[in-house]
Amino acid sequence: MARARKVTGPVVGLDVGTTLMKVAEVRPGKEGVQVSAVGVAPTPEGVIDESGYIQDPQALGQAIRQLLSQAGISTKHVVTSIPGQSALVVRVIEMPKMSPAELDKSMAWEVERHIPFAAQGDVVTDYAVVERPDADPNDPNMEVLLAAAQQDVVDTVVKALFAAQLEPVAIDVQVLATARTIIGLQREKYQGKTVVLLNIGATATDMGVFSGGVLRLPRSIPIAGNHFTQAIVDSLAYRVEGADPRERFAHAEKLKREYAAVLLERLGPAGASPTYAADMGAATGLIDFSQPSPPGMVDFSAGYGEPTFDVGEEQPAEPEPSAQPEPTPPAPVEPEETDPMRIEVFDAIAPILGDFLAEVRRSLEFYRGRAQDGRIDEIVLCGGTARMKNLDKFLSQELGILVSVADPLSHQETLVRRYSAPYLQEVAPVMTVAIGLAIRDMID
C-alpha cells in the first residue's frame, strides 16, 4: 500500500468524459489513502462535444455540483483532467542530456515539433525529465515527458470548476492518473514489471505502457465504447427502436449493456472466428494553482456500458460501517451462450473487437521494437467497456498476455458508506482516473 504524504485534507478527483462524469473523494491516512466517497452520473447532453471541448461550462458546473451533492462530497479542492483527446498531447521524447536551464530553452522548439496545433501563445505546456532506475549513466540522451493542451480548452475546464464552486489544485494527465491508481497503489505487485493500462472510454481508449512504474509509451486508440454501440445500431437496425438518431443510439447502448459479450466458443482455435479471421479485423501535473480560486447516481445493474439513461434508479442499500467490498475472483469460462439476442449482438460487435485487438497488437509490437527488454507482464483494463463479459479472456487468449480488469476500490481502504458493496464493485473500473487524480499529491 502506498504511503501518504502530509496533505492538509481530502481532495476530489474529477474525471469528466463525453458520456460520464466520475468523482472520488480521497483522504490521506496513516496507512495509505482512504476513498471516502465516489459518484458517477451521465454527462449532460450537449455540454461537451465528441472532441472533448466544453461547450457550456456553466451547465457542466451545475451538473458537477449536483453529482457532488448526490455523492455526499463537500470537499472543495479538486484535481481534474482535460476531457477528450484532440486538445491534449502527451509525448515521451528523446533529447540530448542538458542542464535544466538549457532544457527550458530547448522545450520551446520541441513543443512546436510535437503538437498538432499552433503553439504561439495558445498552448499550456508542462514537462519533466523521465528518471529511469535502469538508465545507462553514459547514455548521451535522456527522455522527457511532454504534456500540452490548448489554452481555450484549459480555460473552459477552469470555468466549469468555478461554476461548480470548486477550487482547482491542478489539471493532470489521465494516463498518469490511471497509473497512480493501478500501479502506485499496488507497488509490491507491479514492482519491476511492465504493465499496459487500457482505459476504454466512450470515444477513445487511453493506452499507457509502464515499465518499473515509469511511462514508456502513451497512445490514444480511436476505438472505444461508442464504436461498439454504433455497430449495434448499424447491424441490428430492426432491433433498435426510435426515429431520432439519439434515441436509436440510446436503445443500442441498452442492448450493449444487457447482451454484449465475447462468445469465446464461437471463435476458432486461434481466437478468430471463420467470419472474422486474420486479425479479428513523471510530470506531476499540467497546471498548478498556487493561489486560492474564486469562489442521481448511474444504475449499472443492467450491464457494463457508459449509460445515458435515468440516474435515479440506483438506490443501493447502505452497508454496515465495517463492510468492505470484496473483490470477486475471475469467473471460469462459461459455455457458449444460446440466447439468440446475445449471439446477434456479438456478431454485430465482432468486427469492432477485431479492430480493437489489431490496434492494441500494433501498439505492443511498436513498444517491443523500441524497448531493450520488450517484455510485457500484464494488461489491465479499466473504463466502462472493461466490464464486457470475457473481453479480458479474449485479449489474453489472442495476445498471450495476462489481462485483468481494474478494481481500484479494493487496493486501499474504502470508507464509502452511501452505497452497497455490489454497487461499488460495478462502478470500480470507471473510477481509476478519478481516484488517481485525487491522490496526485498523496503518494510518491
Image (cartoon, rainbow, N blue to C red):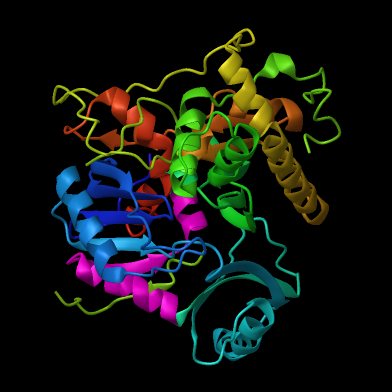
Using the image, determine if residue 150 lies above or below residue 46.
below
- Observer-nearest of 341 and 319: 341
- Percent across and percent down for residue 238 are 58, 30
- Observer-nearest of 228 and 72: 228
Using the image, determine if residue 123 lies above or below residue 246.
below
Which quadrant: the N terminus?
A: top left
Q: Main secondary structure of the magenta part?
A: helix
Query: On the rendered structure, is 101 left or right of 401?
Result: left
- Observer-nearest of 315 and 349: 349
- Percent across and percent down for residue 327 are 39, 23
Residue 437 in sight here? yes
- Percent across and percent down for residue 282 are 52, 63
Please give the name of the residue rendered at 82% of the width and 53% of the height, measured from the top-left corner: 369
Confirm whether the magenta stretch covers residue 104.
no
Instruction: Return the residue found at the far front.
Output: 243
Residue interval drawn in magenta: 152-180
Residue 406 in sight here? no
Q: How many marks?
A: 0
Which quadrant: the C terminus?
A: bottom left
Q: Where is residue 432, by image quadrant?
A: top left
Query: On the rendered structure, is 384 left or right of 29?
Result: right
Please give the name of the residue rendered at 57% of the width and 52% of the height, measured from the top-left corner: 204
Please give the name of the residue rendered at 18% of the width and 60% of the height, measured from the top-left corner: 8
Please give the name of the residue rendered at 19% of the width and 29% of the height, measured from the top-left corner: 315
Query: On the rendered structure, is 247 left or right of 212?
Result: left
- Observer-nearest of 367 and 44: 44
Confirm whether the magenta stretch covers residue 178.
yes
